[in-house]
Amino acid sequence: MISARLTSSALRLLFLALLVAAASIVPDRPGLIRPAGGVVAFVGGTLIDGTGAEPVLGCTVLIEDERIIAVGAKVEIPEGAEVIDVSGHTLVPGLIDMHGHLFTNLGGNFENEMVPFARLYLAGGVTTIFTAGEEFPDEVLSFRDAQREGLEIGTRIYSAGPYFDHADGVGPGGTLDGAESARAMFEEWGGKIDGVKVYMGITPEEFSAVAERAHAAGLTVTGHLGSLTASKAIELGIDRLEHGLYAMSEFGSPSSSNPFGLEFMQGIADIDFDSAPGKSLIEQVVENGVVLDPTTVTLESLFGGPLQLTNWRQYLTPNALKANDQMIRALGAMRARMAPAEEWSDLVERVLEKQRELIIRVHAKGGKVVAGTDPVFVDILPGYGLHREVEHFVLAGMTELEAIRACTLDAAESLGLEKELGSIEVGKYADLVVLEGNPADDITALGGTKIVCQAGARFSPEELRESVIGAIE
Ligand SMILES: [Zn+2]
């Protein structure tokens, strides 16, 4: 008896020890309200499904584990389902930022911000990003893989890995030096990345070599162009164009020492889209199905200084804030040397207006425009920046529902992920955002995230944000 009792208590201890061990490897998941599992019904909300269809009032979205299993005004709720009343709120698909990054530029230094950025994106309802070039590609790819194994939380990451550029390029630098090296660089990274990002210095031969391999591997190619005009890159088979007019060198190029030379900006402001080069470029974009990712918000930050989208400063350490503020002041002084403040702000407004004209002209002709933010300056705060980018689409003349589609289903399509992501439809991943207001009436309501659901797991935006206060360093 005694020995039996000893055995059973020894087993109990062993069991407890195993529990403790299991608990210690369970990752820290701040902001997680409930992991995916079981049947959950979001009831009574207004549905905007991401396809561009009119909102449906009093809608039920039923999810099971990671997927959406029913959507509609007359869905029967199975017994035992967890019911979440979202009446008075709006449901939209998880947003997709097509030009995300997990690093930022703090006072001229590139810093790795994977954890805070991944959580801030998610808190802003951005359930998926495509990182258009990474300063720390190995770290980001490991983080992405850890996330796929459930060990890290945050926005779902598709990554372009490193920039395909020359070692001495203006940007972070790749390893290109001729077509052969371009093939070698793709050989090294192609199996690990989710798409290719080419950068400012790439030559036509290198571009063709990379694009041929990438397309054969089923990957898309996007670019921040400089050496190639947009028109040339389209001829060579590019899939997406980043930054709109800022990176279409047929209209002029920024100098590497001054990203916003007055002449360059003047040139953009004076583009005439009814003239032959403007007209033919828009036709070429649309006819070739090339996707425009204008990142208007980047221009707004770069040209105008801090965007003040939110209280972004609270997320930075005091040192990071200092470095950032010094850089912003230096950029401001550079602008002040070029033109008086009033003249400068008029010019910035004309440049933004021209960028919005590009957006609406491509859109009106049936071309595809997606939303990206490029948070290389920290005031384009992950999550928040996308809400502002989409606001530019509405200012350009898209309807609110078209603008929402641009940052959901259109984005998923441009990555070839439309069967899994991008809309609230049966069979897709349960990526949805519960909003306080209705963005079909006022697009800025996209910023009012109350609950974020990513593949069926539910998160509190507030707690996600709280978890990264002072974490950007
Ligand atoms: Zn970028």
Image (spheres, rainbow, N blue to C red):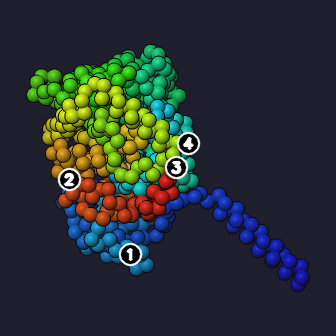
Which residue is nearer to you in this view: 255 or 44?
A: 255
Answer with mark 1 or mark 3, whichever residue precedes in sequence.
1
> Rounded to the nearest whole Å, what is the CA distance between mark 1 and mark 3?
35 Å
Q: Mark 4 or mark 3, which is nearer to you?
A: 3
| CA neighbours of label 3 inside 10 A, class few (<14), some (14 to 19), many (20+) | some
- Which part of the image, by quadrant, shows the N terminus? bottom right
CA separation in Å, label 4 and label 3: 20 Å
Give the CA separation, mark 4 to mark 2.
Answer: 37 Å
Using the rendered view, name the quadrant where residue 85 is placed: bottom left
| Front disc: 2 or 3 | 3
Which amino acid lies under the numbered mark 3 shown in the image of this protein?
Answer: Ala
Amino acid at the residue labelled 2: Glu
- On screen, residue 392 versus residue 10, left or right, reads left
Q: Position of residue 459 (x, y in %)?
A: 44, 62
Residue type indicated by callout 4: Ser
Question: Which is more foreground, mark 4 or mark 2?
Answer: 2
Who is closer to the viewer here, 209 or 444? 444
The residue beneath circle 2 is 400
Tell me, for residue 142, which label it has, or none: 4
Contact, mark 4 vs mark 2 (Cβ under 8 Å) = no
List the residue tagged with mark 1. 83
Disc 2 secondary structure class: helix
- Seen from the viewer's position, the closer of residues 323 and 278 is 323
Residue that label 3 marks: 471
Residue found at x 48% / y 40%? 322
Label 4 environment density (alpha carbons within 10 Å; few <14, some 14–19, many ≥20) = few
In the image, residue 387 sits, relative to residue 73, either above or below, namely above
> Where 354 falls versus 466 (above or below)?
above
